[in-house]
Image (cartoon, rainbow, N blue to C red):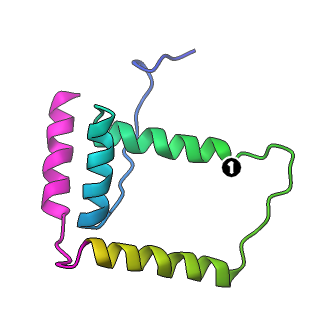
Amino acid sequence: MATATTERKKPLGVRVTVEQHRVIAEAAAREHRSISSFVLQAAMQAAESTKDSGETRKRRTPEEIHAMLRHAQELMRKANPARRPLVDELIAERREEALRD
């Protein structure tokens, strides 16, 4: 069985807004973790919680999904009124993390 140090790793790219990045970076800092580590753990927890546990899950209607998206978009608009792009910051951060790995 392969250990975490011998397993091959695959990149996982995610594009976020400046405000999303700020919120995630602050949360990761509060836990004294890298953004990558923080996001990976959150994604894994979400993935594990959605595994079929033998219970029937309620499917959301398209209307519910659109309402949730509109709400999330409005929150992001309020949090990032300047609509700054974060691509350069994200690339620099990934390069720094790659150098540390």
90 in magenta: yes
- Magenta span covers which residues? 80-101
Q: Is residue 65 left or right of residue 23?
A: right
Indicate whether 11 appears above or below 67. Answer: above
Indicate whether 28 appears above or below 101. Answer: below
Indicate whether 13 appears above or below 5. Answer: below
- The structure residue drawn at horizontal position 33% and vertical position 34%, both measured from the top left corner, is 31
Of 56 and 76, nearer the camera is: 76
Q: Is residue 86 left or right of residue 62?
A: left
**Could you say whether the residue bearing mark 1 is in a helix, strand or loop?**
loop
Q: Amino acid at mark 1?
A: Thr
4 in magenta: no
Q: Quadrant of the N terminus?
A: top right
Of 61 and 98, nearer the camera is: 61
Q: Quadrant of the C terminus?
A: top left
Of 10 and 88, nearer the camera is: 88
- Quadrant in the rendering for residue 10: top left
Residue tagged 1: 50
Residue 33: horizontal and vertical position, in percent?
Answer: 30, 33
Residue 78: horizontal and vertical position, in percent?
Answer: 30, 77
- The structure residue drawn at horizontal position 58% and vertical position 47%, both measured from the top left corner, is 46
Q: Main secondary structure of the magenta part?
A: helix
CA neighbours of label 1 inside 10 A, class few (<14), some (14 to 19), many (20+): few
- The structure residue drawn at horizontal position 23% and vertical position 65%, both measured from the top left corner, is 18
Residue 82: horizontal and vertical position, in percent?
Answer: 16, 78
- Quadrant in the rendering for residue 28: top left
